[in-house]
Amino acid sequence: MSSKITIAERNGQLVHISEVDSGLSNCVCLNCKGLLIARKGEINEHHFAHYKVDCGIHFETQLHLAVKTILREENKIRLPERDLFFYYDTVKIEKRLKTIAPDIFIKNDQEEIIIEVTVAHACDDLKIAKIREINISALEIDLSKINRETSISELRKIVIENINYKKWLYKKMVFNDVPIIEKEKIKTSNDEVKVADTSLLEVIAFVFFIILLGLVADRIPWKKVFRNNIKR
Ligand SMILES: [Zn+2]
C-alpha cells in the first residue's frame, strides 16, 4: 500500500486531499503537526507531503489517527447487532491497559470499550486472548477496504454510523444483557412512542365520541324536545 498520505488537519478539522488546492494551504500532519504541502500534479496520485521534515507517518497510521479524531469529535458510536449507540466521554489512543496496548480506548462512567482499527493487520489471537483475560469488550473497525479516495464524511459514517465494518472481538458478558447505550436515546425513543400512542389514542377517542354522538343524536326525539320547548 502506498505510504502517501491523503488526510491532514486544517484549523483543527480533518481534511482530505481532494478538498484542498495544490501547494501549501495551512494543512498539518495528524502525527507530528508539521506543515504539509498538497501535491496534486498530473502524474502522481494526489497526496500530502511534509513541507520540511517527514515524521514517517504512513497511510495506516493516518487512518488510526483520523479514527481517533472522529471518535473524539462525535462522542458516540453505533454498535453491531443492536441498533444502539454507545455514548462515551473519554477517548484515549494506544493507552497501556493492563497487559495490552489497545488502538483506541473509549469509556463512559459505566462501561469501556477497546476499539481496534484494522487496516492491514487484523488483531492477532494473542491480543484477543489478552483482551479476554482483562475482560474488556473490544470492537474491531475494519478499514481494510478504505482507499485513498475515501472522503472524511464517508470515513466518519463508517466509524460512527455504519455497523457493516464492525465486529466484536470480545464482548463482555454484561453487554449481552445490560444496556451500555446512551440513556437519552432510550428515553427519547420511549417518549416518542408515548407521544405517538397518546395522539393515536386521542384520535380513536375523538372518532368514538363522534360516532357515539351520532348514535345518541339519532335516539333523541329532537322534534318532541323542540315542540315541548315551544309549547312552554
Ligand atoms: Zn508528520
Image: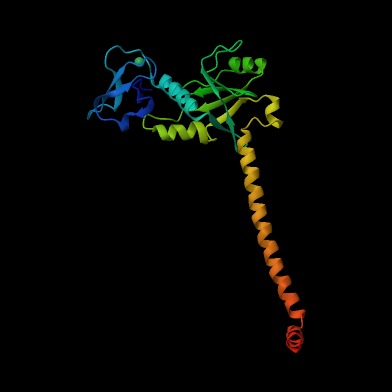
Q: Nearer the viewer, residue 101 or 164?
A: 101
- List x then y, in percent, for residue 117: 50, 23
As drawn, is 223 to the left or to the right of 48? right
* Color theme of the render: rainbow
Name above or below for residue 8 compared with residue 96: below
Q: Nearer the viewer, residue 45 or 159?
A: 159
Q: Nearer the viewer, residue 165 or 211?
A: 211
- List x then y, in percent, for residue 49: 29, 19
- List x then y, in percent, for residue 134: 65, 15
Q: Residue at x 42, y 21 (%)?
A: 60
Q: Residue at x 70, y 26 (%)?
A: 174
Instruction: Locate residue 168: give its quadrant.
Output: top right
Q: Residue at x 64, y 24 (%)?
A: 111
Instruction: Locate residue 77: give its quadrant.
Output: top right
Instruction: Locate residue 55: give its quadrant.
Output: top left
Residue at the extreme front of the image, as rendered: 232
Quarter of the image with the N terminus is top left
As drawn, is 8 to the left or to the right of 226? left
Name above or below for residue 217 compared with residue 232: above
Q: Nearer the viewer, residue 157 or 60?
A: 157
Name above or below for residue 196 compared with residue 96: below
Residue at the extreme left of the image, as rendered: 42
Name above or below for residue 29 compared with residue 77: above
Quarter of the image with the C terminus is bottom right
As drawn, is 213 to the left or to the right of 93? right
- List x then y, in percent, for residue 131: 62, 17
Q: Quadrant of ligand 1?
A: top left
As drawn, is 57 to the left or to the right of 126? left
